[in-house]
């Protein structure tokens, strides 16, 4: 079965064609196109919902056309297209592409999937109303998809890197940690149709904390990737390090508390970190080196609690797989520290995470969820649900 999937919950406009064969438990990506308006939001240091939706209205049809045309070549196109739709592979002008996309949708696509929540209402409406129109016009079944669950289902995508790295595929049951710009949630996935919410953030999400603190530090938006790059420049000494490095590391530097790290629940809280960092930098002259130190300490504080509670959930429920998802899970240090934690706890727990391009918002994960959870609904009954959560 082949699905055209659409994702517009935040500032990205994504469309993808994904496929699953009946006997397979994983999903292949035939094309994946994402247009982002992040440069616009970088100017304001955050997303202005109205601006995001206006850009999405302009981008949605070209992105869908592009992904349908790319899918014909049967290979994933993973570069963000940034509203420029000239590709080297196809010399067609937009008129020809439009006609070709029309034929592909009519003859080769079995169903349409769309994110219906949670997210920004204006952005969601762009995707949902477009999907409903296509479903009606092309007589295709329509599947509404929960954006947060889809972040975890990104782990069912088998791309070239997982084949090359022999990354083992995910199987139920597993613990899922969603760490994105808007959410931080811990869930137990028992089967495709059964999951249990274990806990989540009481205030800011992990990515939101990174972005807000990044703004205090004058970093680019979204700040997660730059914080990762800067933190990686800080080399903490090991037992074998040169004495000079040990001495330098002993000098006072940034260190922040890991919020709720010792609480017995599975909740998180990251809003206090912003105040802590603001207080810390108010007395300091911000050098490049100090910003790197703060990025390092910030990651340490956030990742420690994410890892501790997720690993504890796996132990408590006797689960041997942990699946990560959401933009923050693109962070290599987080992935590495998760691995180190299971090793140091002598646990036989496997950590699974999506390829980087499927960790941040993308339409392929929406299609992956719909293929594994195929539940079409009459298009009249599908609405954008900005506050959709876990019920
Ligand atoms: O999942 P996502 O693309 O969108 C939401 O659903 O929110 O997540 C975006 C978040 C942003 O807060 C961004 O700063 C963070 O993911 N992020 C990262 C990295 N890449 C994106 N955080 C840490 N390290 C990264 N490499
Ligand atoms: Zn997301």
Image (spheres, helix red, strand yellow):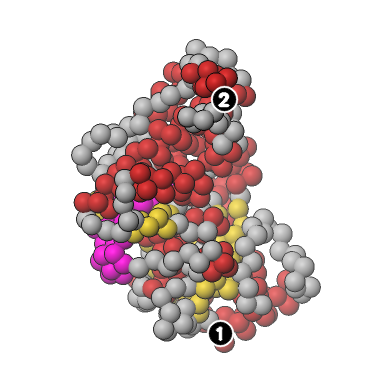
Give the label, 2 or 1, closer to the camera: 2
Mark 2 or 1 closer to N-term? 1
Give how far across and how far down residue 1 sits, in percent.
47, 82
Cα separation between marks 2 and 1:
62 Å
Residue receiving disc 1: 108
Is 65 drawn above or below residue 310 in the view shown? below
Q: Residues within 10 Å of mark 2 (few under 14, many from 20)?
A: few
As drawn, the residue found furthest toward the bottom would be: 107
Q: Main secondary structure of the magenta part?
A: strand
Question: Where is residue 325, by image quadrant?
Answer: bottom left
Asked if residue 307 lies left or right of residue 48, the reply is left
Is 366 drawn above or below residue 42 in the view shown? below
Give how far across and how far down residue 40 sits, in percent.
63, 44
Return the residue nearer the eye: 134 or 222: 222
**What's the residue at 54%, 39% (across, down)?**
228
Range of the magenta residues?
172-196
Residue receiving disc 2: 242
């Amino acid at each position: 079965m082949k699905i055209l999937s659409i994702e517009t919950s935040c500032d990205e406009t994504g469309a993808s064609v994904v496929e699953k064969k009946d006997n397979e438990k994983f999903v292949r990506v035939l094309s994946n196109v994402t247009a982002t308006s992040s440069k616009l939001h970088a100017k304001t240091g955050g997303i202005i919902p109205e601006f995001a939706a206006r850009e999405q209205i302009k981008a949605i049809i070209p992105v869908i056309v592009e992904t349908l045309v790319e899918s014909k070549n049967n290979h994933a196109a993973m570069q963000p297209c940034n509203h420029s739709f000239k590709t080297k592979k196809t010399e067609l002008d937009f008129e020809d592409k439009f006609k070709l996309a029309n034929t592909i949708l009519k003859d080769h696509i079995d169903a349409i999937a769309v994110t219906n929540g949670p997210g920004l209402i204006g952005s969601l409406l762009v995707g949902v109303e477009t999907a409903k129109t296509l479903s009606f016009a092309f007589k295709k079944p329509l599947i509404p998809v929960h954006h947060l669950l889809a972040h975890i289902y990104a782990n069912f995508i088998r791309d070239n890197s997982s084949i090359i790295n022999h990354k083992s595929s995910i199987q139920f049951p597993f613990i899922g940690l969603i760490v994105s710009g808007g959410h931080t949630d811990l869930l137990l996935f028992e089967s495709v149709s059964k999951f249990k919410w274990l806990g989540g953030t009481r205030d800011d999400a992990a990515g939101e904390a990174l972005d807000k603190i990044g703004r205090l530090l004058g970093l680019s938006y979204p700040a997660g990737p730059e914080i990762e790059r800067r933190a990686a420049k800080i080399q903490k000494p090991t037992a074998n390090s040169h004495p000079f490095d040990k001495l330098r590391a002993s000098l006072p530097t940034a260190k922040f508390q890991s919020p709720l790290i010792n609480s017995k629940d599975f909740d998180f809280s990251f809003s206090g970190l912003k105040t802590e960092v603001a207080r810390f930098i108010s007395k300091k002259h911000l050098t490049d080196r100090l910003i790197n130190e703060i990025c390092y300490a910030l990651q340490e504080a956030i990742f420690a609690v994410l890892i501790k509670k997720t690993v504890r959930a796996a132990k408590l429920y006797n689960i041997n797989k942990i699946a990560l998802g959401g933009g923050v899970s693109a962070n290599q240090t987080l992935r590495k520290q998760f691995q180190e934690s299971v090793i140091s706890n002598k646990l036989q727990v496997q950590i699974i995470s999506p390829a980087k391009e499927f960790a941040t918002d993308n339409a392929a994960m929406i299609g992956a969820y719909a293929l594994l959870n195929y539940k079409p609904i009459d298009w009249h009954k599908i609405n954008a649900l900005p506050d959709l959560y876990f019920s």
